[in-house]
Amino acid sequence: MSSNRPLKIVWIYPDLLSTYGDQGNTIVLERRAALRGIPYETVNVRSDQPVPPDGDIFLLGGGEDRPQILAAQRLRRDGGLAEAAQRGAVVFAVCAGYQLLGHQFGGEEGQPVQGLGLLDISSGRGEQRAVGEIVGDVSAELNVPRITGFENHQGVTRIGPGAKPLAKVVAGVGNGDGQGFEGAYSGRVLGTYMHGPALVRNPGLADLLLTWAVGQQLQPIDDSWAGRLREERLAAVLS
Ligand code: GLN
């Protein structure tokens, strides 16, 4: 983030990728930035608009199969997200958004559809839909507490050598790759199957993205309400 302008949060394709309230991830980043006195601006980029390559944090949500294919085609043609990611911008993507960051994903008939290749993952269609609560223990190097969310996807995702698993599944399916992994990340590009919205349920993950974007440690904030939500969801799933 350049120091003389507000943190630029970019919500990609609200018209195509916005299932399960994933746009709430934007609100959480705004709120947690504001509580730290970090100036920010949010840009909603519809699928007929160019993606601004000078964003600091790009957010993508889940989507149905066909909007997901359309989103992948338009993002590939546009090139702005790839340019930003190569420059080191933060990208946080959920479910359909996560899959389309990879090399390929399964279309509505299971056909391979080309992704953006920003994350070394490949997805296809699984035998069964994974639907329900999911809990995972995050890769130790990220220093984020146990994550909780809701998943609903047919896709199965394999992680290649250029990316690492975000978490080890404690409950639920996640990537469904037979290795018990959930999500993936490489550099500052991070994807997950967790809706919820993910950053509402996991303030630690929100702060990881903000820390990457601002390049410094953040002041702690009172998370007692988020803590109650987390306790409730974790108890419901793990008891
Ligand atoms: N269409 C994708 C799948 O079923 C993504 C679904 C979603 O984003 N919820 O795997």
Image (cartoon, rainbow, N blue to C red):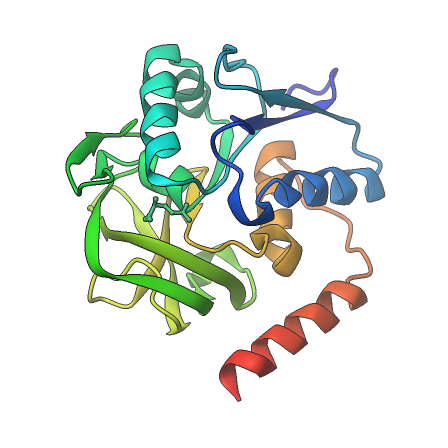
Residue 31 percent location from the top left of the image = 78, 42
Does residue 105 sit above or below 151 in this rendering? above
Q: Nearer the viewer, residue 180 or 20?
A: 20
Residue 90 percent location from the top left of the image = 51, 33
Q: Residue at x 34, y 67 (%)?
A: 173
Does residue 203 sit above or below 109 in this rendering? below
- The image quarter in which residue 62 lies: top left
Q: Residue furthest bottom?
A: 239
Q: Residue at x 22, y 66 (%)?
A: 179
Does residue 89 sit above or below 191 in this rendering? above
Residue 101 appears in the rendering? no
Name the quadrant of the N terminus.
top right
Classify residue 129 as left or right of residue 37: left
Residue 98 percent location from the top left of the image = 38, 42
Q: Nearer the viewer, residue 219 or 56?
A: 56
Q: How many tags in the picture?
A: 0
Q: Nearer the viewer, residue 119 or 12?
A: 12
Classify residue 73 as left or right of residue 13: left
Classify residue 71 as left or right of residue 56: left
Residue 67 percent location from the top left of the image = 39, 31
Q: Residue at x 31, y 29 (%)?
A: 69
Residue 180 appears in the rendering? yes
Does residue 216 sit above or below 137 in this rendering? above
